[in-house]
Amino acid sequence: MKDNGACADYFKSQSGWNRFFLLMKSKWESLGRVGGKVCLKKSTLQERVSIGRFLGRIIEDETVEISLAEFENALKRTRFSETSFTELLEAYFGEKLVSKAERKITEEYQREAFFKKAEDCFRQNSESGRDAAVWIHEAYKRQEYGYSLIVREMYTNEEQAFSLLEKTGRALGILEALSSQRVVCGIPLAVLAARVSGNPHDLDRGTVSGRLLMNVLCFLQQKKYPDSALAWKQRLAAASVLPDNISSQVTVYGIHLERENGTHQAAEAFCRMHEPFVLTAYNVSGLVRAYAEDRDVFIVENEMVFDYLIEAVHSAPISILCTSGQLHATALELLELLVKENCCIHYSGDLDPEGMGIADRLWQKYPEHIQIWRMSTEDYEKSVSHEKAGDRSMTMLNRLCNKELKKTAELLKREKYVGYQENLLQELKQDLYVHINSK
């Protein structure tokens, strides 16, 4: 009489079988049938005894290689001969076995049904934009423009994923309505988010909703997904969506600005008074030109370092920027203008994975204009702190391209401790003095 449960219980009660059964299950799922071999590496003595006793042979090697057919034949010689190999595995793991090929087909049907449901919903929902159905159809067909993001959300929670798509459709509907009404000023991103979901931050760059909307805009504009804050802002602007113009800031000293109608009088006044000033995205949006006191611009990451340096060089004809960490859209737009003036930009950041990553990306974007400043191995040794870098952030160092930064990164990997700009104040100040006196 067949008793699959008793057969499974027998193997569960015997020590040394669990890892072997996991390997057999994986092999069956890969092939969809009884076939092939499994290899149990670094086996224990108990595993070798249990498997060898069942197969009727002595196993001495730590690496145990057995075919599924051999195991099945041995099973037929026991009192559980009526239990098939597949039935044993299903009883042992308490689930129906599904091959990878079958699972792939099932998942494809699930994805197809989900995207078809979304397309039909977009076509029938008057709140959705006219382009929503076209986008979701093409996203599924091409497997791009947000496809991977949607699928990941679908497997996590299908209901929430569908709700996410509905919000995206409503956002497109609002943008299309504004376009048909020829609204020139556009709509603030926070206002659009609040109208779509009630949360003014729902479409921010770091959210799933924000990334999905950006994928749709890239589809409509036939552009690549933005790789920077500036490109992100440009994609939104092209759709008449106004990003936050206040929180994106850069602090500057000795930078001259021009609009289409002439000199930016407020910026010029700060330059005359030798005082720093803060530029927001709103301030930068109407600029046609930005230039330095001379050809050189010095950028630091840290606010305290910036404050120290401008006090040290007060009244001297020199240009310094402070990015306060990440390069936001405002800083990137200002840099674009400075690069057009053929400025030489000296960038100095913290000697940690994040700071070196920012420096490297900036260098890759403007290789002919960016000079890495005070981020060498010697500077690391002077700036090193007692704070350890996180293991997760250390992997960022593997993506560096600049030769000097890569050399410093190797030292950072060995030492494990990060370096900070605050420990290089004297060196940074001396560099500025040398620059000023050389003019």
Image (cartoon, rainbow, N blue to C red):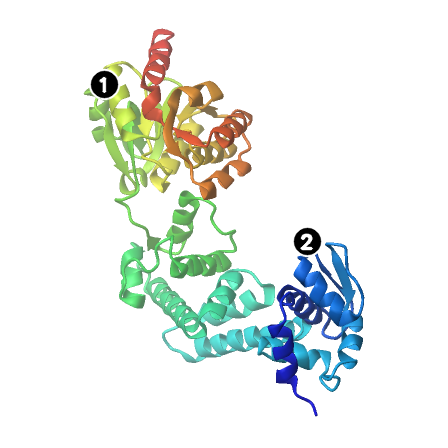
Q: For the N terminus, which image quadrant?
A: bottom right
**Viewer-proximal residue, 212 or 273?**
212
Residue at 42 percent across and 23 percent down: it is 346
- Above or below: residue 127 compared with residue 341: below
Residue type at mark 2: give it.
Lys
Tell me the residue that label 2 is attached to.
42
Q: Residue 138 sits in which quadrant?
A: bottom right
Instruction: Residue 145: give x, y in percent of width and height.
Output: 52, 60
Give percent across and percent down for residue 271: 24, 22
Is 278 positioned to the left or the right of 398 in the image?
A: left
For mark 1, give the secondary structure.
helix
Q: Quarter of the image containing the C terminus?
A: top left
Sequence-wise, which precedes: disc 2 or disc 1?
Answer: 2
Judged left or right of residue 65, residue 145 is left
In the rendered structure, the answer to whether residue 377 lies left or right of residue 332 reads right
- Whether residue 188 appears in this view of the structure is no
Q: Amino acid at mark 1?
A: Glu
Q: Position of residue 201 (x, y in %)?
A: 30, 57
Q: Are marks 2 and 1 in contact (CB under 8 Å)?
A: no
User: What residue would you read off at disc 1?
Assistant: 311
- Disc number lying in front (2 or 1): 2
- Say which mark, if any, is on residue 64: none
Q: Residue at x 77, y 56 (%)?
A: 60
Res. 288 visible in picture: yes
Dot 1, how many residues are within 10 Å of its Cα: few (below 14), some (14-19), or many (20+)?
Answer: few
Q: Residue at x 37, y 38 (%)?
A: 326
Say which of 178 and 87 sits in front: 87
Counting from the top left corner in percent of width and height, residue 115 is at 52, 73
- Mark 2 is surrounded, within 10 Å at the Cα level, by few (under 14), some (14 to 19) or many (20 or more) other residues, namely few
